[in-house]
């Protein structure tokens, strides 16, 4: 039994999600592949975005995959860290802006 809940070897099993729902699994992989094709954004830019999102979503498999992908695409560790900070700033800002809802509720209840 592994000492960690997440096993890095499981990332290699990702393609097997089609086994229990072939149609939906294949549709996901078709979509996923299409998203990462070159378009208005380069594959390099998409990899960096994916790395930042992987951190905000806290997916260890995605972090591993897109760290490796980013390095292979020539993205520096400084660029990766800066992207992660951008993601963290957006995530924290999104959390704080929801405080307005709490403030509105408090104001309404205090009336």
Image (cartoon, helix red, strand yellow):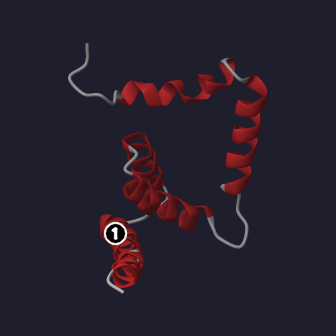
Foreground residue, 5 or 61?
A: 5
Q: Residue at x 39, y 77 (%)?
A: 105
Assign the C terminus to one quadrant of the image. Answer: bottom left
Residue, disc 1: 88
Q: Residue at x 40, y 25 (%)?
A: 9
- x%, y% of residue 12? 49, 27
Q: Quadrant of residue 44?
A: bottom right
How many tags in the picture?
1
Foreground residue, 17 or 43?
A: 17
- x%, y% of residue 97? 39, 79
Furthest-top residue in view? 1
In the image, residue 87 sits, relative to residue 28, either above or below, namely: below
In the image, residue 66 sits, relative to residue 61, either above or below, namely: below
Q: Residue at x 36, y 65 (%)?
A: 80
In the image, residue 68 sits, relative to residue 105, either above or below, namely: above
Tell me: 58 left or right of 44.
Answer: left
- x%, y% of residue 33? 70, 47
Element at label 1: helix
Residue density around tag 1, few if under 14, some if 14–19, many if 20 or more, within 10 Å = some
Q: Residue at x 35, y 81 (%)?
A: 103
- x%, y% of residue 109? 36, 78
In the image, residue 37 sits, relative to residue 27, either above or below, namely: below
Assign the N terminus to one quadrant of the image. Answer: top left
Foreground residue, 47 or 26?
A: 26
């Amino acid at each position: 039994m592994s000492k960690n809940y997440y096993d890095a070897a499981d990332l290699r099993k990702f393609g097997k999600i089609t086994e229990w729902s072939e149609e939906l699994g294949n549709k996901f992989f078709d979509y996923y592949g299409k998203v990462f094709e070159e378009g208005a954004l380069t594959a390099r830019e998409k990899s960096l975005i994916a790395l930042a999102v992987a951190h905000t979503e806290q997916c260890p498999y995605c972090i591993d995959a897109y760290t490796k992908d980013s390095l292979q695409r020539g993205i520096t560790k400084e660029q990766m860290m800066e992207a992660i900070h951008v993601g963290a700033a957006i995530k924290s800002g999104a959390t704080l802006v929801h405080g307005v809802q709490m403030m509105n509720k408090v104001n309404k209840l205090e009336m």
